Image (cartoon, rainbow, N blue to C red):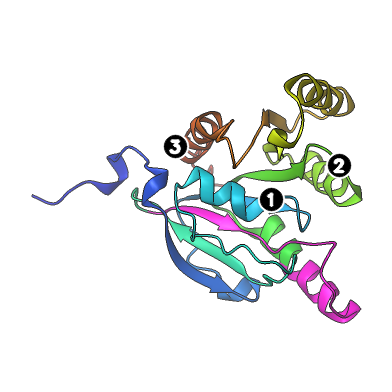
Amino acid sequence: MSEDLSAKTISFNSARFLVSASRFEECPADTGAEVAFAGRSNAGKSSAINSITANGKLARTSKTPGRTRLINFFSLNRENCRLVDLPGYGYAKVSRDMKDDWQKHLDHYLSQRLSLRGLILVMDIRHPLTDFDQMMVEWCEHNQLPLMILATKSDKLKFGQAKTALLGIASRLKSFSCVQHLIMFSATSKKGVDESRNALTQWLEQVEEPEQQA
């Protein structure tokens, strides 16, 4: 008797590299459910992915922020469930044409990917809501895409300072209905990892309403 992979409890420890895409047309089949991670370079996105999946080598961290220029897909143990690592922006020393090319393919992915259930925006709690962050929040609001924010590197601040910073982010975003989760996060102390996994599971397990026939 074959195993029903769609009924499996999602295990983020099961995440494995699936494929990289340099452009939208190279993405895997647009079926099932996936959640994408975005963040300004140097915000700790790769470390956050590695912490959530308990795999220190899954998302490559680099001493040259912004070096990853591909959309990277990771499979999970449930059939057609994926995590997606989007290219980092804002820090890489590359040509303007290359940045424009990245932006074009990122826009295609975010606007046309039917299996995308939500976006996780990773931002440094010490330097939150940069221009890039604000742009992504506004994009999610305009397109009604659920948004989870991970306020990373919280271990770099005292708890009181981190709490105040988180409340400041919440205050600035209170008018945005797309923000479903705002989580204080630390890849070093693992703070926020379980909360992030729970929120991810909710998104990945939600059932899409079938499109009504005309």
Query: Which label's residue is closer to the chain start, 3 or 2?
Result: 2
Front disc: 1 or 3: 1
Where's residue 170, x and y in %? 81, 24
* Residue 46 appears left or right of 200: right
Q: Which residues are magenta?
A: 80-105
Element type at mark 1: loop
- For badge 3, the amino acid type reads Glu
Element type at mark 3: helix
| Label 1 to label 2: alpha-carbon separation | 12 Å
x 36%, y 51%: residue: 14
For residue 14, above or below residue 165: below
Residue 116 visible in this rendered orientation of the protein: no
Element type at mark 2: loop
Where's residue 106, x and y in %? 73, 64
Where's residue 136, x and y in %? 80, 48
x 91%, y 49%: residue: 131
- For badge 1, the amino acid type reads Gly
| Label 3 to label 2: alpha-carbon separation | 32 Å
Q: Nearer the viewer, residue 199 or 108?
A: 199
Q: Which residue is mark 3?
A: 205
Q: Which residue is mark 2?
A: 127
Per the rendering, the mark at residue 44 is 1
- For badge 2, the amino acid type reads His
x 66%, y 30%: residue: 183
| Label 1 to label 3: alpha-carbon separation | 26 Å
* Residue 86 is one of the magenta-drawn residues: yes
Query: Which label's residue is closer to the chain start, 1 or 3?
Result: 1
For residue 132, above or below residue 60: above
x 34%, y 52%: residue: 79
* Residue 181 is one of the magenta-drawn residues: no
Number of residues whose C-alpha sits closer than 10 Å to that of mark 2, classed few (under 14), some (14–19) or many (20 or more) = few
Front disc: 3 or 2: 2
